[in-house]
Image: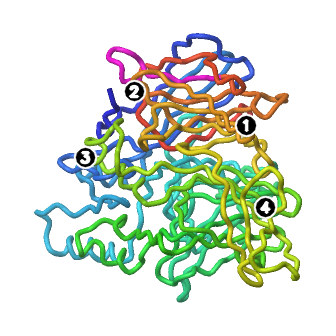
């Protein structure tokens, strides 16, 4: 039994108590928000790609051993326009929307003009981010939607472009202990230049507390990186951070801006304007957080596609960073509905499973080092960085394991050396049937699955004042496809990866993308 990916979800805006089996730890107090696509057809029209669906936000609130569930559709401008027209009228990455054939020429001409310089969707269905004291539903466009983290009501539409010239921004920011957020965006052909902007959204200053101004108004640019090619910026989904550095991989999966401008006219979607060039290498940018300057050494590695960084840390003059890397661009194509209906849950020959790769970048280079010498001096990794010429290193990763994605760590060790990751198992297909705990030191993995139950990304929540990195629980929402059975939130012990409790909900839990845990009192 596989999930019906194209089935429209039903929202449950009223909080409903879950039926708990086992014991939810008393210390687990807070709310897990999860986001993902939920509406796939409107009237006679439907989306072509699963990622395009209109956002359904889910809330799992934990208090005193109980769990309460609720869900709501994000009432974005996209949602309102589509619902008012009773058809999909706002284009998404994998679905180009065309006006009703009965509409007159003027409407068609205006729609055409709107697509040459696309005004992107505000359908934030990928993740939640926190800027200042506010929470936003986000995809990767310049629009984010403020939401109420308790009731899930949709609030202000915020445009990055008012504060920062970015047309696209990542949905995976990082946060420091003080609550400052760090993110990256792409500025397309602004004043004739295409560049990547790494920025910081500071915690709300005292003078602004209680005001309704978005924290983005105090945004600070850390660093601007010119794009390797003016009209084809790299696509990225996340980046790495340590105490002193930011890591950005400029990979050869690129958005062709000119093709995007003519896509509507050519009758193709924007995703078709993403081109992977496997013959090109990846350029790894290492940026000093304090100075905002890029480290002078140029780091290159072989072609790969990275969506998710795992973590990064510093050790003895090196920056070590872990990523989940694919060797081609087939992952996105797996989620077209035509593909999902065909392949759901079965082994797909066209699928290439990802590798968990560890890179090590030596930061300070001695001038006297010979060409061909490996400069990585760490005992615990086989990752190398070989001098090709002055100021240029070719990096080779250590592969820790294969077939894992949607990695999460104990975020308290973000930017520090970690040992454990919690992730989805994607050995045979991009659709995970089980979740895992992976030990980066022993290379052991412990898996958890249940027949005909489909997990979401596992989120680790540390126990307050926990004794070890894995002292906490792992939360994963399971879409239960067994007839007559309810879907549930699974709570696993972070150390043993054994079930502690599950909370059955009176609603279907469709597959979702990413989640954000808000501890009680935040």
Q: Is residue 484 a member of the stretch shown in magenta?
A: yes
- Spatial CA distance of label 1 from label 3 is 49 Å
Name which residue lies at 48% across and 48% down: 353
- Spatial CA distance of label 3 from label 2 is 20 Å
Q: Is residue 295 left or right of residue 191?
A: right
Specify the label residue 442 is tagged with: 1
Q: Disc 4 marks which residue? A: 319
Residue 398 versus residue 31: which sits nearer the camera?
Answer: 398
- Spatial CA distance of label 4 from label 3 is 48 Å
SS at badge 3: strand
- Spatial CA distance of label 4 from label 1 is 21 Å
Q: Circles 3 and 2: CB distance less than 8 Å?
A: no
Q: Disc 2 marks which residue? A: 508
- Pick whichever of labels 1 and 3 is earlier in the sequence: 3
The percent coordinates of residue 310 (x first, y second) are: 65, 49
- The local crowd at label 4, few if under 14, some if 14 to 19, many if 20 or more residues have their Cα within 10 Å, is many
Specify the label residue 42 is tagged with: 3
């Amino acid at each position: 039994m596989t999930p019906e990916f194209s089935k429209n979800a039903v929202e449950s805006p009223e909080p409903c108590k879950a039926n708990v089996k086992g014991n939810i730890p008393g210390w687990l107090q807070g709310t897990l928000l999860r986001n993902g696509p939920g509406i796939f057809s409107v009237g006679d029209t439907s989306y072509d790609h699963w990622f395009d669906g209109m956002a359904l936000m889910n809330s799992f609130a934990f208090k005193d051993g109980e769990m309460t569930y609720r869900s709501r559709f994000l009432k974005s401008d996209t949602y309102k326009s589509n619902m008012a027209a009773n058809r999909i009228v706002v284009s998404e990455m994998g679905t180009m929307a065309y006006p009703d054939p009965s509409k007159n020429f003027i409407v068609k001409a205006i729609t055409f003009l709107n697509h040459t310089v696309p005004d992107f969707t505000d359908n934030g269905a990928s993740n939640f981010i926190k800027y200042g004291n506010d929470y936003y539903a986000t995809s990767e466009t310049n629009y984010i939607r403020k939401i109420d983290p308790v009731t899930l009501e949709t609030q202000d539409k915020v445009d990055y472009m008012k504060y920062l010239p970015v047309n696209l921004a990542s949905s995976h920011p990082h946060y420091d202990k003080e609550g400052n957020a760090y993110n990256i965006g792409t500025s397309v052909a602004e004043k004739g230049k295409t560049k990547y902007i790494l920025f910081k959204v500071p915690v709300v200053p005292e003078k602004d507390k209680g005001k309704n101004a978005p924290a983005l108004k105090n945004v600070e640019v850390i660093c601007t990186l010119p794009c390797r090619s003016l009209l084809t910026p790299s696509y990225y989904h996340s980046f790495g951070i340590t105490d002193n550095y930011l890591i950005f991989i400029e990979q050869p999966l690129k958005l062709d801006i000119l093709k995007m401008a003519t896509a509507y006219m050519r009758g193709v979607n924007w995703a078709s304007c993403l081109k992977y060039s496997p013959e090109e290498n990846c350029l790894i940018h290492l940026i000093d957080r304090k100075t905002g300057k890029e480290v002078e050494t140029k780091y290159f590695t072989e072609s790969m596609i990275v969506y998710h960084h795992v973590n990064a840390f510093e050790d003895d003059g090196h920056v070590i960073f872990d990523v989940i890397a694919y060797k081609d661009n087939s992952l996105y194509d797996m989620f077209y509905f035509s593909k999902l209906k065909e392949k759901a849950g079965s082994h797909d020959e066209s699928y290439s499973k990802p590798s968990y790769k560890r890179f090590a970048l030596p930061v300070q280079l001695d001038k006297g080092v010979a060409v061909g010498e490996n400069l990585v001096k760490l005992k615990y990794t086989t990752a190398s960085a070989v001098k090709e010429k002055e100021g240029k290193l070719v990096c080779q990763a250590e592969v820790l394991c294969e077939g894992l994605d949607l990695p999460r760590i104990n975020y308290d060790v973000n930017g520090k050396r970690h040992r454990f990751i919690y992730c989805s198992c994607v050995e045979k297909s991009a659709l995970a049937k089980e979740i895992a705990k992976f030990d980066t030191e022993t290379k052991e993995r412990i898996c958890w699955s249940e027949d005909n139950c489909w997990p979401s990304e596992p989120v680790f929540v540390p126990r307050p004042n926990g004794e070890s990195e894995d002292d906490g629980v792992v939360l994963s929402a399971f879409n239960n496809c067994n007839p007559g059975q309810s879907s549930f939130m699974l709570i696993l012990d972070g150390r043993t990866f054994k079930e502690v409790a599950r909370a059955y909900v009176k609603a279907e839990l469709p597959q979702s993308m990413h989640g954000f845990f808000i501890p009680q009192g935040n």
